[in-house]
Amino acid sequence: MDSKRSVIIIGCGRVASKHIKAIKKLKDRCYLAALVDNNPDAPARLLASSGLKGDIKIYSDYKLAIEELHPDIVAVTVPSGLHYSIAEYALEHDCHLLLEKPMTMSSSESRKIYELSLAKERKIAMGHIFRYFPLVSLLQQDIASGKFGKVTHGTIFVRWGHKDDYYQTAAWRGTWKTDGGALMNQTIHAIDLLVWLMGSTPIEAEAMLAQRLRSIEAEDLGMAILRMNDGALASIEGTTATSDKEHAAMFTVFCENGVINLGIRKGKPSLNIRNGSGKKLNGKYIRKQLKSYGLSSMLNALNPHTGIYKDFLDALDDGRQPLADAASGYTSVDTLMGIYKSALLKKAVTLPLEDDFSSMDMQGFFENNKKSI
Protein backbone atom coordinates (compact mmCIF):
# COMPACT_ATOMS: atom_id res chain seq x y z
CA MET A 1 0.00 0.00 0.00
CA ASP A 2 2.91 2.38 0.69
CA SER A 3 3.65 2.84 -3.03
CA LYS A 4 0.02 3.61 -3.85
CA ARG A 5 -1.93 6.82 -3.41
CA SER A 6 -4.54 6.68 -0.67
CA VAL A 7 -8.02 8.01 -1.43
CA ILE A 8 -10.96 8.84 0.79
CA ILE A 9 -14.37 9.53 -0.70
CA ILE A 10 -16.60 12.04 1.09
CA GLY A 11 -20.21 11.45 0.10
CA CYS A 12 -21.65 8.04 -0.76
CA GLY A 13 -24.31 8.95 -3.32
CA ARG A 14 -24.66 7.81 -6.93
CA VAL A 15 -21.53 9.57 -8.23
CA ALA A 16 -19.34 7.87 -5.61
CA SER A 17 -19.88 4.51 -7.31
CA LYS A 18 -18.14 5.87 -10.42
CA HIS A 19 -15.16 6.83 -8.27
CA ILE A 20 -14.98 3.34 -6.80
CA LYS A 21 -15.07 1.77 -10.26
CA ALA A 22 -12.14 3.98 -11.27
CA ILE A 23 -10.18 3.11 -8.13
CA LYS A 24 -10.77 -0.62 -8.76
CA LYS A 25 -9.57 -0.19 -12.35
CA LEU A 26 -6.41 1.55 -11.14
CA LYS A 27 -5.83 -0.68 -8.10
CA ASP A 28 -2.11 -0.94 -8.84
CA ARG A 29 -1.75 2.84 -8.35
CA CYS A 30 -4.30 3.84 -5.70
CA TYR A 31 -6.58 2.39 -3.05
CA LEU A 32 -9.69 3.40 -1.15
CA ALA A 33 -8.78 4.10 2.48
CA ALA A 34 -12.15 5.32 3.74
CA LEU A 35 -15.71 6.32 2.97
CA VAL A 36 -17.35 9.27 4.71
CA ASP A 37 -21.06 9.97 4.96
CA ASN A 38 -23.35 11.34 7.67
CA ASN A 39 -25.86 8.63 6.77
CA PRO A 40 -24.56 5.54 8.61
CA ASP A 41 -26.15 3.14 6.09
CA ALA A 42 -24.81 4.77 2.92
CA PRO A 43 -21.17 3.50 3.00
CA ALA A 44 -22.22 -0.12 3.58
CA ARG A 45 -24.69 0.04 0.69
CA LEU A 46 -22.06 1.54 -1.58
CA LEU A 47 -19.46 -1.09 -0.71
CA ALA A 48 -21.95 -3.92 -1.16
CA SER A 49 -23.00 -2.69 -4.60
CA SER A 50 -19.40 -2.08 -5.73
CA GLY A 51 -17.97 -5.39 -4.56
CA LEU A 52 -14.87 -3.60 -3.29
CA LYS A 53 -13.09 -5.41 -0.48
CA GLY A 54 -10.26 -4.55 1.86
CA ASP A 55 -9.57 -2.58 5.02
CA ILE A 56 -11.82 0.38 4.24
CA LYS A 57 -12.65 2.57 7.20
CA ILE A 58 -16.02 4.24 7.66
CA TYR A 59 -16.46 7.75 9.07
CA SER A 60 -19.34 10.12 9.64
CA ASP A 61 -17.03 13.12 10.21
CA TYR A 62 -14.84 14.14 7.25
CA LYS A 63 -12.56 16.24 9.46
CA LEU A 64 -11.76 13.24 11.65
CA ALA A 65 -11.13 11.06 8.59
CA ILE A 66 -8.68 13.58 7.13
CA GLU A 67 -6.91 14.13 10.45
CA GLU A 68 -6.53 10.43 11.22
CA LEU A 69 -5.69 9.07 7.76
CA HIS A 70 -3.79 11.94 6.11
CA PRO A 71 -4.93 10.75 2.66
CA ASP A 72 -3.11 11.66 -0.52
CA ILE A 73 -6.38 12.40 -2.33
CA VAL A 74 -9.74 13.56 -0.99
CA ALA A 75 -12.58 12.91 -3.44
CA VAL A 76 -15.57 15.17 -2.78
CA THR A 77 -18.91 13.84 -4.04
CA VAL A 78 -21.35 15.61 -1.71
CA PRO A 79 -24.02 18.15 -2.79
CA SER A 80 -22.46 21.20 -4.41
CA GLY A 81 -23.31 23.56 -1.57
CA LEU A 82 -20.97 21.61 0.73
CA HIS A 83 -17.95 21.66 -1.57
CA TYR A 84 -16.32 24.82 -0.28
CA SER A 85 -15.97 23.91 3.40
CA ILE A 86 -14.70 20.40 2.67
CA ALA A 87 -12.30 21.53 -0.07
CA GLU A 88 -10.87 24.25 2.14
CA TYR A 89 -10.34 21.85 5.05
CA ALA A 90 -8.69 19.21 2.85
CA LEU A 91 -6.30 21.73 1.27
CA GLU A 92 -5.43 23.20 4.66
CA HIS A 93 -4.46 19.66 5.72
CA ASP A 94 -2.22 19.21 2.65
CA CYS A 95 -4.45 16.85 0.68
CA HIS A 96 -4.88 16.84 -3.07
CA LEU A 97 -8.48 17.14 -4.22
CA LEU A 98 -10.68 15.40 -6.74
CA LEU A 99 -13.67 17.69 -6.73
CA GLU A 100 -16.96 17.07 -8.49
CA LYS A 101 -18.44 19.99 -10.41
CA PRO A 102 -19.16 22.75 -9.68
CA MET A 103 -16.15 23.72 -7.59
CA THR A 104 -18.36 25.85 -5.29
CA MET A 105 -21.60 27.79 -5.47
CA SER A 106 -20.05 31.28 -5.62
CA SER A 107 -17.41 33.05 -7.67
CA SER A 108 -15.43 34.26 -4.65
CA GLU A 109 -15.37 30.85 -2.96
CA SER A 110 -14.10 29.21 -6.15
CA ARG A 111 -11.37 31.81 -6.44
CA LYS A 112 -10.39 31.19 -2.80
CA ILE A 113 -10.12 27.44 -3.38
CA TYR A 114 -8.08 28.00 -6.52
CA GLU A 115 -5.72 30.41 -4.76
CA LEU A 116 -5.45 28.17 -1.70
CA SER A 117 -4.41 25.23 -3.89
CA LEU A 118 -1.60 27.37 -5.29
CA ALA A 119 -0.50 28.58 -1.85
CA LYS A 120 -0.51 25.05 -0.41
CA GLU A 121 1.03 23.58 -3.59
CA ARG A 122 -1.76 21.01 -3.77
CA LYS A 123 -3.40 19.88 -6.99
CA ILE A 124 -7.11 19.81 -7.80
CA ALA A 125 -8.69 17.62 -10.46
CA MET A 126 -12.19 18.75 -11.39
CA GLY A 127 -14.97 16.36 -12.38
CA HIS A 128 -15.32 18.00 -15.80
CA ILE A 129 -15.92 14.63 -17.39
CA PHE A 130 -16.19 15.76 -21.01
CA ARG A 131 -12.50 16.70 -21.17
CA TYR A 132 -11.71 13.02 -20.63
CA PHE A 133 -13.79 11.61 -23.48
CA PRO A 134 -11.86 9.99 -26.35
CA LEU A 135 -10.59 12.33 -29.13
CA VAL A 136 -11.33 15.50 -27.13
CA SER A 137 -7.70 16.25 -26.25
CA LEU A 138 -6.57 15.62 -29.82
CA LEU A 139 -9.21 17.96 -31.17
CA GLN A 140 -8.39 20.64 -28.60
CA GLN A 141 -4.72 20.49 -29.57
CA ASP A 142 -5.46 20.78 -33.29
CA ILE A 143 -7.89 23.67 -32.82
CA ALA A 144 -5.32 25.46 -30.63
CA SER A 145 -2.54 24.90 -33.18
CA GLY A 146 -4.62 26.50 -35.94
CA LYS A 147 -5.20 23.38 -38.07
CA PHE A 148 -8.84 24.36 -38.47
CA GLY A 149 -8.13 28.09 -38.85
CA LYS A 150 -9.86 30.82 -36.86
CA VAL A 151 -12.64 29.77 -34.51
CA THR A 152 -15.79 31.72 -35.41
CA HIS A 153 -18.27 30.42 -32.84
CA GLY A 154 -19.37 27.44 -30.80
CA THR A 155 -22.62 25.92 -29.57
CA ILE A 156 -23.66 23.43 -26.93
CA PHE A 157 -26.93 21.95 -25.83
CA VAL A 158 -27.40 19.73 -22.81
CA ARG A 159 -30.87 18.20 -22.80
CA TRP A 160 -30.65 15.99 -19.74
CA GLY A 161 -34.26 15.40 -18.85
CA HIS A 162 -35.32 14.53 -15.33
CA LYS A 163 -38.81 13.98 -14.02
CA ASP A 164 -39.95 15.50 -10.75
CA ASP A 165 -39.23 12.25 -8.90
CA TYR A 166 -35.50 12.79 -9.54
CA TYR A 167 -35.67 16.04 -7.63
CA GLN A 168 -37.94 14.60 -4.94
CA THR A 169 -35.47 11.86 -4.00
CA ALA A 170 -33.24 14.46 -2.30
CA ALA A 171 -34.42 17.75 -0.79
CA TRP A 172 -31.26 19.61 -1.89
CA ARG A 173 -31.74 18.95 -5.61
CA GLY A 174 -32.84 21.92 -7.67
CA THR A 175 -32.34 24.42 -4.81
CA TRP A 176 -30.34 27.61 -5.16
CA LYS A 177 -28.40 26.92 -1.96
CA THR A 178 -26.99 23.48 -2.63
CA ASP A 179 -27.53 22.55 -6.29
CA GLY A 180 -28.66 25.25 -8.70
CA GLY A 181 -30.66 24.43 -11.78
CA ALA A 182 -30.07 22.84 -15.17
CA LEU A 183 -27.19 25.18 -16.04
CA MET A 184 -25.29 24.77 -12.77
CA ASN A 185 -25.83 21.04 -12.30
CA GLN A 186 -26.19 19.47 -15.72
CA THR A 187 -24.45 21.97 -18.00
CA ILE A 188 -21.42 23.45 -16.23
CA HIS A 189 -18.93 20.82 -17.41
CA ALA A 190 -20.27 21.22 -20.95
CA ILE A 191 -19.61 24.96 -20.70
CA ASP A 192 -16.10 24.12 -19.50
CA LEU A 193 -15.50 21.86 -22.51
CA LEU A 194 -16.82 24.33 -25.08
CA VAL A 195 -14.67 27.17 -23.73
CA TRP A 196 -11.63 24.85 -23.60
CA LEU A 197 -12.14 23.63 -27.16
CA MET A 198 -12.62 27.17 -28.48
CA GLY A 199 -9.32 28.18 -26.88
CA SER A 200 -10.45 31.59 -25.67
CA THR A 201 -11.74 33.25 -22.52
CA PRO A 202 -15.30 34.48 -21.84
CA ILE A 203 -15.41 38.25 -21.33
CA GLU A 204 -19.18 38.86 -21.45
CA ALA A 205 -22.34 36.86 -20.71
CA GLU A 206 -26.01 37.44 -21.44
CA ALA A 207 -28.71 34.98 -20.42
CA MET A 208 -32.34 34.11 -19.73
CA LEU A 209 -33.76 31.46 -17.38
CA ALA A 210 -37.13 29.76 -17.24
CA GLN A 211 -39.16 27.24 -15.27
CA ARG A 212 -41.17 25.16 -17.70
CA LEU A 213 -41.97 21.69 -16.37
CA ARG A 214 -40.05 20.80 -13.21
CA SER A 215 -41.21 21.73 -9.70
CA ILE A 216 -37.91 23.09 -8.42
CA GLU A 217 -36.62 26.33 -6.97
CA ALA A 218 -34.04 26.97 -9.72
CA GLU A 219 -34.29 26.87 -13.53
CA ASP A 220 -35.14 23.80 -15.57
CA LEU A 221 -34.20 25.71 -18.73
CA GLY A 222 -31.46 28.24 -19.35
CA MET A 223 -29.98 29.85 -22.44
CA ALA A 224 -26.95 32.10 -22.70
CA ILE A 225 -24.55 33.77 -25.10
CA LEU A 226 -20.87 34.25 -24.27
CA ARG A 227 -18.56 36.72 -25.98
CA MET A 228 -14.97 35.50 -26.01
CA ASN A 229 -11.81 37.59 -25.79
CA ASP A 230 -10.93 36.84 -29.43
CA GLY A 231 -14.33 38.00 -30.69
CA ALA A 232 -15.89 34.53 -31.07
CA LEU A 233 -19.37 33.84 -29.69
CA ALA A 234 -20.69 30.79 -27.86
CA SER A 235 -24.32 29.77 -27.39
CA ILE A 236 -25.49 27.59 -24.50
CA GLU A 237 -28.71 25.67 -23.87
CA GLY A 238 -29.17 23.59 -20.74
CA THR A 239 -32.39 21.93 -19.64
CA THR A 240 -33.91 19.13 -17.62
CA ALA A 241 -37.38 19.82 -19.09
CA THR A 242 -36.98 17.13 -21.75
CA SER A 243 -37.51 13.37 -21.84
CA ASP A 244 -35.46 11.41 -19.32
CA LYS A 245 -35.08 8.73 -21.99
CA GLU A 246 -33.52 11.06 -24.57
CA HIS A 247 -30.42 12.38 -22.76
CA ALA A 248 -28.17 14.30 -25.13
CA ALA A 249 -25.19 16.63 -24.86
CA MET A 250 -23.77 18.01 -28.12
CA PHE A 251 -20.86 20.34 -28.83
CA THR A 252 -20.07 22.11 -32.08
CA VAL A 253 -17.08 24.33 -32.82
CA PHE A 254 -17.26 26.23 -36.11
CA CYS A 255 -13.91 27.17 -37.60
CA GLU A 256 -12.61 28.91 -40.69
CA ASN A 257 -11.49 25.58 -42.16
CA GLY A 258 -13.75 22.99 -40.62
CA VAL A 259 -16.47 22.00 -38.18
CA ILE A 260 -16.09 19.80 -35.11
CA ASN A 261 -19.26 18.20 -33.80
CA LEU A 262 -19.20 15.67 -30.99
CA GLY A 263 -21.29 14.55 -28.09
CA ILE A 264 -23.47 11.82 -26.68
CA ARG A 265 -27.08 10.83 -27.40
CA LYS A 266 -28.96 8.20 -25.42
CA GLY A 267 -25.66 6.83 -24.11
CA LYS A 268 -24.05 6.52 -27.56
CA PRO A 269 -21.20 8.72 -28.85
CA SER A 270 -21.81 11.03 -31.79
CA LEU A 271 -18.98 12.33 -33.96
CA ASN A 272 -18.79 14.42 -37.13
CA ILE A 273 -15.47 16.12 -37.88
CA ARG A 274 -15.01 17.77 -41.27
CA ASN A 275 -12.36 19.96 -42.84
CA GLY A 276 -13.01 23.09 -44.87
CA SER A 277 -13.74 21.05 -48.01
CA GLY A 278 -16.36 18.99 -46.21
CA LYS A 279 -14.19 15.86 -46.01
CA LYS A 280 -14.99 13.69 -43.02
CA LEU A 281 -12.07 13.20 -40.62
CA ASN A 282 -13.61 10.81 -38.07
CA GLY A 283 -11.44 7.83 -39.05
CA LYS A 284 -8.26 9.87 -38.97
CA TYR A 285 -8.87 10.98 -35.40
CA ILE A 286 -9.96 7.55 -34.18
CA ARG A 287 -6.77 6.00 -35.60
CA LYS A 288 -4.69 8.75 -34.02
CA GLN A 289 -6.37 8.20 -30.64
CA LEU A 290 -5.68 4.46 -30.77
CA LYS A 291 -2.07 5.00 -31.81
CA SER A 292 -1.37 7.68 -29.19
CA TYR A 293 -3.33 6.38 -26.20
CA GLY A 294 -4.34 2.77 -26.94
CA LEU A 295 -7.67 0.96 -26.96
CA SER A 296 -8.17 1.44 -23.22
CA SER A 297 -8.52 5.21 -23.78
CA MET A 298 -11.55 4.59 -26.00
CA LEU A 299 -13.20 2.66 -23.19
CA ASN A 300 -12.93 5.62 -20.80
CA ALA A 301 -16.19 6.91 -22.25
CA LEU A 302 -17.92 4.11 -20.33
CA ASN A 303 -16.72 5.67 -17.06
CA PRO A 304 -14.91 8.99 -17.58
CA HIS A 305 -13.89 8.97 -13.91
CA THR A 306 -11.30 6.32 -14.79
CA GLY A 307 -9.73 8.87 -17.11
CA ILE A 308 -9.91 11.54 -14.42
CA TYR A 309 -8.17 9.35 -11.85
CA LYS A 310 -5.51 8.13 -14.29
CA ASP A 311 -4.70 11.66 -15.42
CA PHE A 312 -4.69 12.88 -11.81
CA LEU A 313 -2.29 10.15 -10.69
CA ASP A 314 -0.07 10.88 -13.70
CA ALA A 315 -0.13 14.59 -12.87
CA LEU A 316 0.89 13.92 -9.27
CA ASP A 317 3.76 11.70 -10.45
CA ASP A 318 4.89 14.08 -13.20
CA GLY A 319 4.51 17.35 -11.27
CA ARG A 320 2.10 18.86 -13.81
CA GLN A 321 -1.46 20.12 -13.54
CA PRO A 322 -4.38 17.76 -14.22
CA LEU A 323 -6.22 18.09 -17.53
CA ALA A 324 -9.18 19.71 -15.73
CA ASP A 325 -7.38 21.65 -13.02
CA ALA A 326 -8.19 24.16 -10.29
CA ALA A 327 -8.12 27.05 -12.76
CA SER A 328 -10.80 25.36 -14.87
CA GLY A 329 -12.93 24.86 -11.76
CA TYR A 330 -12.75 28.53 -10.83
CA THR A 331 -13.27 29.81 -14.38
CA SER A 332 -16.31 27.64 -15.04
CA VAL A 333 -18.01 28.76 -11.81
CA ASP A 334 -17.23 32.42 -12.51
CA THR A 335 -18.70 32.07 -16.01
CA LEU A 336 -21.81 30.32 -14.69
CA MET A 337 -22.32 32.96 -11.99
CA GLY A 338 -21.97 35.60 -14.69
CA ILE A 339 -24.75 33.86 -16.61
CA TYR A 340 -26.98 33.82 -13.53
CA LYS A 341 -26.18 37.45 -12.76
CA SER A 342 -27.07 38.44 -16.33
CA ALA A 343 -30.45 36.73 -16.01
CA LEU A 344 -31.06 38.47 -12.69
CA LEU A 345 -30.11 41.94 -13.95
CA LYS A 346 -31.62 41.41 -17.42
CA LYS A 347 -28.50 42.70 -19.12
CA ALA A 348 -25.07 41.59 -20.26
CA VAL A 349 -22.36 41.34 -17.59
CA THR A 350 -18.59 41.53 -17.86
CA LEU A 351 -16.40 38.52 -17.03
CA PRO A 352 -14.56 37.69 -14.90
CA LEU A 353 -16.85 39.08 -12.22
CA GLU A 354 -15.35 41.89 -10.17
CA ASP A 355 -17.67 41.35 -7.19
CA ASP A 356 -18.80 38.12 -5.62
CA PHE A 357 -21.93 36.48 -6.93
CA SER A 358 -23.43 33.26 -5.59
CA SER A 359 -26.35 31.02 -6.41
CA MET A 360 -28.02 32.31 -3.24
CA ASP A 361 -28.29 35.71 -4.94
CA MET A 362 -30.85 34.05 -7.21
CA GLN A 363 -33.28 33.17 -4.42
CA GLY A 364 -36.75 34.47 -5.24
CA PHE A 365 -35.81 35.01 -8.88
CA PHE A 366 -38.83 33.28 -10.40
CA GLU A 367 -41.26 34.56 -7.77
CA ASN A 368 -40.14 38.12 -8.50
CA ASN A 369 -40.35 37.66 -12.27
CA LYS A 370 -43.57 35.69 -12.74
CA LYS A 371 -45.09 38.38 -14.93
CA SER A 372 -42.18 38.43 -17.35
CA ILE A 373 -41.34 34.70 -17.56
Image: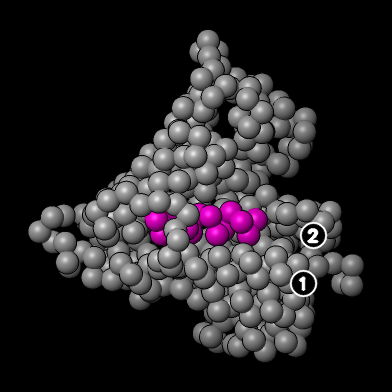
**Furthest-left residue in this view:** 371
User: Which residue shows up at 61% across the image and 56% down it?
Assistant: 327
Q: Is residue 340 left or right of residue 259?
A: left
Query: Does the magenta segment cover residue 149?
Result: no
Task: Give the residue at mark 1.
Answer: 72
- The magenta-colored residue range is 325-338
In the structure shown, which secondary structural element does the residue marked by tag 1 occupy? Answer: loop
Amino acid, disc 1 = Asp
Q: Do the residues labelled 1 and 2 touch (CB within 8 Å)?
A: yes
Residue 302 at x, y percent in the picture: 60, 47
Alpha carbon distance from label 1 to label 2: 10 Å
Residue at point 53% right, 36% down?
Answer: 198
Which sits earlier in the primary sequence, circle 1 or circle 2?
1
Task: Give the residue number, with chain letter if any, for mark 2.
Answer: 316
- Residue 15 % position (x, y): 54, 64
State which quarter of the image contains the C terminus. bottom left
Q: Is residue 371 above or below residue 116?
A: above
Q: Quadrant of the N terminus?
A: bottom right
